[in-house]
């Protein structure tokens, strides 16, 4: 997978050189490049922002540098991903969709955002997805891109040592995962549930399923309500 990130803070993406994302880059699974938007400015001050038409607080990112940057970076087959407070909430399903694409270009806005004409102009040439991490406000898109890149990279072939992890984890099947435990069996007078030490894989699977349903119902009633009833069996309905 080829990924290009455009930002006025390219150093923000140093974390993408670490751990499993860094390994994916080293092995060639992920071809990631970060670009400084100011490369496409031509004034002595390398200006990327200006005051908003219609007035209001803050500054808006100028269209000219973005237009030239996207023309240079987003070739045929690219999908533009724009983190934004007004974007579609980013979900695991989105991570799977993006992980299946050949080339992603991330546009990291700052200030009050990017001139809307940049998004509209790009949409004439490529798919554009405006996404939001959640209902809170960040300073810019960089943190969102780091989160999205981690969510995508772990879905790429060979990145996770045990691909089975993907099938049981939270949100993979629309539910939250069950609690996890490891040694010691007793810690501060708290015991690991006996079923998990029973060796009875059928019982363990059932216990995890029940805990997953109960946890989802308690913490994410929205996910629980959306969970297809046909995916619930008789045992689930007793939970
Ligand atoms: N994804 C995502 C986001 C952002 C986000 C993303 C890109 C930009 C660019 C600029 N800003 C700052 C800003 C802009 C407009 N209104 C208020 C603040 C951003 C915020 N905030 N919250 C999220 N979940």
Image: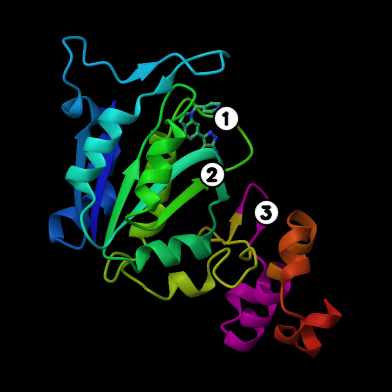
Residue 173: mark in rendering: none
Whether residue 200 is visible here, answered yes or no, is no
**Colouring of the image:** rainbow
Kindly identify which residue carries mark 1.
Answer: 137
What x and y, as percent, mark residue 31? 18, 55
The residue shown at (35%, 69%) is 100
Q: Is residue 193 above or below residue 104?
A: below
Task: Find residue 118 and report its horizontal and vertical position in percent.
Answer: 38, 38
**Front-most of residues 220 and 162:** 220
Instruction: Report the side of 30 relative to 166 (left or right).
Output: left
Q: Is residue 194 magenta?
A: yes
Give the x, y percent position of residue 110. Answer: 41, 26
**Residue behind mark 2:** 133
Which residue is label 3 attached to? 190
Q: Is 96 drawn above or below residue 69 in the view shown?
A: below
Rendered-image quadrant of the C terminus: bottom right
Residue at left offset 78%, top offset 86%:
235
Q: Secondary structure at mark 2?
A: loop
> Does the rendering let one see residue 181?
yes
Magenta span main SS = helix
Q: Which residues are magenta?
A: 187-211
- For the point 36% across and 18% down, which residue is it? 49
Q: CA distance from mark 2 to mark 1?
A: 9 Å
Instruction: State yes or no: Cβ of the residue under disc 1 lies below 8 Å from any atom of ligand 1.
Output: yes
Q: Is residue 70 magenta?
A: no
Q: Residues within 10 Å of mark 2 (few under 14, many from 20)?
A: many
């Amino acid at each position: 997978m080829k990924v290009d990130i455009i930002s006025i803070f390219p150093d923000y993406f140093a974390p993408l050189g670490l751990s499993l994302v860094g390994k994916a880059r080293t092995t060639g699974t992920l071809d990631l490049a970060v670009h400084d938007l100011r490369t496409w400015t031509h004034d002595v001050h390398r200006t990327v922002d200006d005051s908003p038409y219609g007035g209001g607080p803050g500054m808006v990112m100028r269209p000219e540098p973005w237009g030239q940057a996207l023309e240079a970076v987003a070739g045929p087959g690219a999908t533009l991903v724009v983190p934004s407070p007004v974007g579609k909430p980013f979900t695991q399903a989105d991570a799977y969709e993006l992980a299946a694409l050949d080339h992603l270009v991330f546009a990291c806005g700052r200030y009050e955002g990017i001139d809307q004409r940049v998004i509209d102009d790009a949409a004439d040439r490529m798919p554009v997805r405006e996404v939001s991490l959640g209902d809170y406000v960040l300073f810019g898109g960089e943190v969102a891109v780091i989160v999205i890149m981690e969510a995508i990279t772990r879905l790429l072939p060979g990145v996770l040592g045990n691909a089975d992890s993907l099938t049981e984890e939270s949100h993979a099947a629309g539910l939250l995962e069950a609690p996890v435990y490891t040694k010691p069996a007793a810690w501060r007078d708290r015991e690991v549930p006996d079923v998990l030490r029973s060796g009875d894989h059928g019982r363990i699977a059932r216990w995890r399923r029940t805990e997953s349903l109960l946890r989802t119902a308690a913490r994410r009633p929205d996910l629980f309500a959306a969970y297809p009833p046909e995916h619930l069996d008789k045992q689930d309905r007793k939970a």
